[in-house]
Image: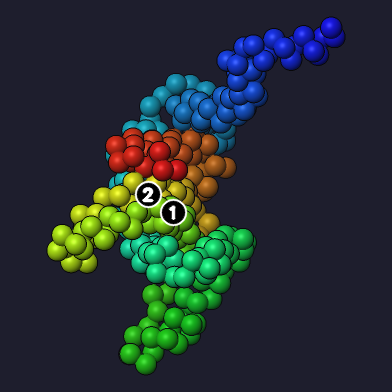
């Protein structure tokens, strides 16, 4: 019996060993590159810089984290970034629900796959192309101004509102897809039973549809919240003078790397807390 044959037989008799060997490479990649880089990020946040040469001084200090919570500018940027991520998530949920309901429950079955493809189509376009397209839409005299001019209004221009609108457009498909899947799997007999018991449309939505779809909404929010919290390119292009955490990290990389690392730990901690909160809703099992 050859060595490969004996090895195959040994692995066949030991399914746990086979599974461990299959997972060894990806787990090693995760541990070394992802968790290792996060560890280096966290450790370097406790270093300092030479104020004259801007060189990193590997001396243990908590000054960077102290500055994060005592400097008004840092506090404002952190709170603004979390607020933008929550606003984008809320807008995505409000817009995604009726769209997903139409694609999953109202549209004819033969059209549903095409509608799903249409929802995914924006994801195939370049990130920068989409953001610059919104820059043109929101510019002075752009499409937004042209559409609102008959009502005596003007577009939001560049700023925080423009950043929220653009991020909502960018990450909306990540909210539509899980809600679409949940609504598509919703048993029709539950809706019929609710109507037979005398519930109107609003009561059926609150008591039947929403509780069953809520985990999928929370699952979609994991993507919209985390992607919005860490974004900085959109804010640079359409945000005007607005700054978020990503912008501060980018601007401090060359001048003060430890401070950039300290700022970089904030979204990591916030996202971990958000994941723990969403775990209670069953969102992680819906991903």
User: How far apart in space, not on screen, are marks 1 and 2 (Cα)?
Assistant: 8 Å
Q: Please tell me whether residue 243 is drawn above or below residue 145 in the rendered image.
A: above
168, 71: nearer the viewer: 168
253, 212: nearer the viewer: 212
Closer to the chain start, of discs 1 and 2, is 1
Image point (64%, 23%), residue name: 22
Give the number of the disc on residue 181: 1
Image point (56%, 67%), residue name: 114
Question: Within the image, what quadrant is residue 197 found in?
Answer: bottom left
C-beta proximity under 8 Å, tags 1 and 2: yes
Counting every numbered tag in the picture gives: 2
Label 1's element? helix
User: Residue 229, image x and y in percent?
Assistant: 42, 49
User: Residue 203, image x and y in percent?
Assistant: 18, 61
Pick out the residue farthest to the bottom.
150
Image point (27%, 55%), residue name: 190
* Crowd tier of the residue under label 1, counting other residues whose Cα lies within 10 Å: few below 14, some 14–19, many 20 or above: some
- Relative side of 114 to 73, left or right: right
Nearer mark to the viewer, of 1 and 2: 1
Q: Please tell me whether residue 111 is drawn above or below residue 182 in the rendered image.
A: below
Give the number of the disc on residue 216: 2
Which quadrant of the figure contains the C terminus?
A: top left
- Relative side of 286 to 35, left or right: left
Label 2's element? helix
Residue 179 is at least partly visible in this image: no
User: Residue 13, image x and y in percent?
Assistant: 64, 11
Which quadrant of the figure contains the N terminus?
A: top right
* Crowd tier of the residue under label 2, counting other residues whose Cα lies within 10 Å: few below 14, some 14–19, many 20 or above: many
């Amino acid at each position: 019996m050859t060595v490969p044959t004996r090895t195959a037989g040994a692995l066949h008799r030991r399914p746990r060993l086979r599974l461990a060997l299959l997972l060894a490479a990806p787990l090693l990649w995760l541990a070394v590159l992802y968790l290792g880089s996060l560890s280096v990020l966290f450790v370097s946040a406790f270093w300092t810089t030479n104020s004259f040469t801007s060189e990193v001084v590997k001396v243990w200090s908590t000054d960077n984290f102290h500055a994060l919570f005592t400097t008004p500018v840092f506090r404002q940027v952190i709170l603004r970034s979390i607020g933008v991520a929550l606003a984008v998530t809320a807008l995505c949920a409000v817009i995604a629900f009726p769209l997903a309901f139409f694609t999953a429950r109202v549209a004819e079955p033969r059209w549903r796959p095409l509608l799903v493809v249409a929802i995914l189509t924006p994801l195939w376009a370049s990130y920068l192309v989409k953001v610059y397209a919104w820059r043109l839409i929101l510019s002075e005299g752009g499409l937004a101004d042209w559409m609102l001019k008959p009502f005596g209004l003007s577009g939001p221009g560049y700023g925080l509102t423009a950043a929220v609108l653009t991020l909502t457009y960018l990450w909306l498909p990540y909210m539509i897809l899980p809600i679409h899947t949940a609504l598509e799997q919703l048993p029709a007999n539950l809706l019929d039973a609710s109507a037979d018991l005398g519930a109107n449309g609003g009561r059926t939505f609150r008591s039947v549809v929403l509780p069953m779809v809520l985990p999928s909404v929370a699952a979609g929010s994991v993507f919209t919240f985390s992607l919005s919290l860490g974004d900085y390119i959109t804010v640079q292009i359409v945000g005007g003078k607005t700054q978020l955490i990503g912008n501060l990290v980018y601007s401090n990389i060359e001048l003060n790397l430890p401070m950039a690392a300290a700022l970089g730990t904030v979204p990591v901690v916030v996202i971990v807390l958000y994941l723990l909160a969403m775990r209670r809703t069953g969102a992680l099992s819906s991903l």
